[in-house]
Amino acid sequence: MKAIQLCFLLLIVFFTSSQQLSKPGDPTYWAAVVEHKELEGDNARDRTTFASESFQQIIKDAGDVDIIVFPEHILNDRSTATFVPHESENVTPCYQTDYELFLIELSCSARSNAVYVVINLVEKELCANGAGSDTFNPCPASGVLYFNTNVVFDRRGRVISRYRKTHLWRHEYVNTAVLRSPDIATFTTDFGVTFGHFICFDMLFYEPAVKLVRELNITDIVYPTYWFSELPFLGAIQLQEGWAFGNDVNLLAADASAPSGRTTGSGIYAGRGGRLIAEIFEEPTTKLLIAEVPKKEHGQLVPSFTPLFTPQLKTARVTGVATYKDYNVDIFESELLEENFLSLERTLCHGSFCCTFAIARKLTESSEDIAIGAKAYRYRIAAYWGNETTVIRVDRSEQATCALFACTNEHLSSCGYIFPKFEDVINRHHFTKLNISANFPAAPRGRRLIMPSTLNAQFLPVAVSEFDWTESPEASANPDKPVFVNLNLLKQQNDLLTFAIWANYFTDLPSTHNLDHMHPNFTVPLTSGSAGILVSSFVWLISGLFLIL
């Protein structure tokens, strides 16, 4: 009898321990992010069904991970929008089935596989007769508002966090609601980590993204995205790694995969320890990326070292990813470098903001034959500080930038583009020294993020072990003070596209996106959903009185 009881207790211990991979006292946890291509189908409901089935299979196949993150805009659209419970309601859709089937299924999948799951979806909310959330958008005649929403399930499939996107991509504003008071969303796990989360374009704004880090002291961020890459500073992995480095936080970033549409690039990052895993794809791809993530309270991860440098006339390059061009560079103070320059030291100023550059290159010797008409990038150095800029032409921005970036010819208009696949591209020179430094002004509103922005021909940032970054005083702790920043290349490079210090000062200048309801003087028309229903009820009441009389 005692032997049976002992076996029973051992089974309990086994199954209990198997439900939780990482413990609060462990120095690491296991995370997974999913790059996922868009699903095809005859109609929207079929596409949602296929996406849900794909997500469920990925969760099942993920194995021993604590948390898995899926990208933005893949799961559903307005035709399959679902109600989403607030975390305070303590709802588990797996058995409280008042929601779209895919939400129920994914809740069950999280519970069945005992894993935290983060999804992004189109949420609906009733707004007629004064119901619903306080949004910029008036309630439409349908009486339903739609949100771009993250949903987090715990290991039991319970909804433990919901976040509604604050900063929409321009066309989203037409049909997607925005809260007047932004969501600040966090959740705490059983493995001792509290996460914050936001969506895609939110990363370029102080609230909620940087607010989570600076004011709530969140050290781990979950980030579903459908990012549109822009060169030379805002490629997907380039921004993800730079943002995680600048804030020194762990970042789990899951991107959709539509390279011809400018969207690809997912990864897991350990703050100033650099990327643990990250990939960009030239064809639509669905892939699970897994990494063991160090918990911040256990100290800084030492960056891993990369192979020894070898000068190469030709290097692998990504050409299958479409990108936007950053038109901000047109107003930067910039200087075209000589085609065959070997060294220079220069201070370049935009107004009172000055950047210092020290650069050296060597001719790349090779026995390879150089094709007639082979192309090589030209380079410019640039400086800028001001607010006559945008982020991807969607919202106003205030930036300070010191940069070296590649151009396809001597004209400024060619900067921010890469050579197409059919061109034969060579590295006539390789960089042996590259140092950029500047005094970055104090932030008048106490809001500033300074980060490295680097990129090579494979659309990956220069590894953090290959450069040195210093701040004096520490930038994040002293936003109200000027900060001297020095970015110094430690390892030679063949094929740089960008090497820069990029600072976001989070402008307060509004962007109304040519939408009536985003203007400060906008008033809700009587034809909106709630008012329209009230007017309709009033008409019926008057008609009834006339019939009685």
Image (spheres, grey):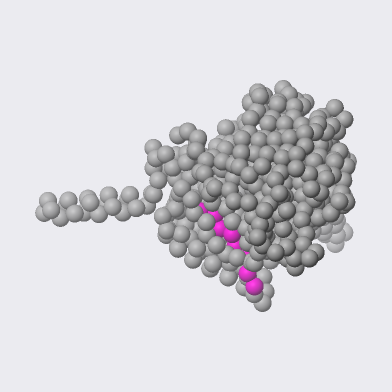
Is 398 situated above or below 201? above
Is residue 201 on the magenta stretch? no
User: Total of numbered circles in the picture?
Assistant: 0
Nearest the viewer among 266 and 438 is 438
User: Please, which residue is most extreme toward the bottom here?
Assistant: 42
Image quadrant in which the C terminus is located? bottom right
Residue 90 in the image, given as x and y percentages of width and height: 50, 48
Quadrant of the rendered image containing residue 509: top right
Is 284 situated above or below 522? below
What residue is drawn where x is 88% and y is 42%?
Answer: 331
Is residue 34 on the magenta stretch? yes
User: Please, which residue is most extreme toward the left here?
Assistant: 1
Q: Which residues are magenta?
A: 32-40
Residue 161 in the image, given as x and y percentages of width and height: 56, 46
Could you tell whether 228 is left or right of 157 in the image? right
Quadrant of the rendered image containing residue 384: top right
Is 316 situated above or below 494? below
Examine the rendering and report whether any part of residue 390 can be seen. Answer: no
What residue is drawn where x is 73% and y is 60%?
Answer: 425
Nearest the viewer among 254 and 434 is 434
Could you tell whether 138 is left or right of 300 in the image? right
Task: Tell me which secondary structure the magenta stretch mostly adopts.
Answer: strand
Residue 142 in the image, given as x and y percentages of width and height: 76, 60
Is 528 situated above or below 479? below
What residue is drawn where x is 52% and y is 41%?
Answer: 303
Quadrant of the rendered image containing residue 184: top right
Nearest the viewer among 131 and 255 is 255
Examine the rendering and report whether any part of residue 544 can be seen. Answer: yes
Image quadrant in which the N terminus is located? bottom left
Residue 541 in the image, given as x and y percentages of width and height: 82, 56
What residue is drawn where x is 63% and y is 51%?
Answer: 311
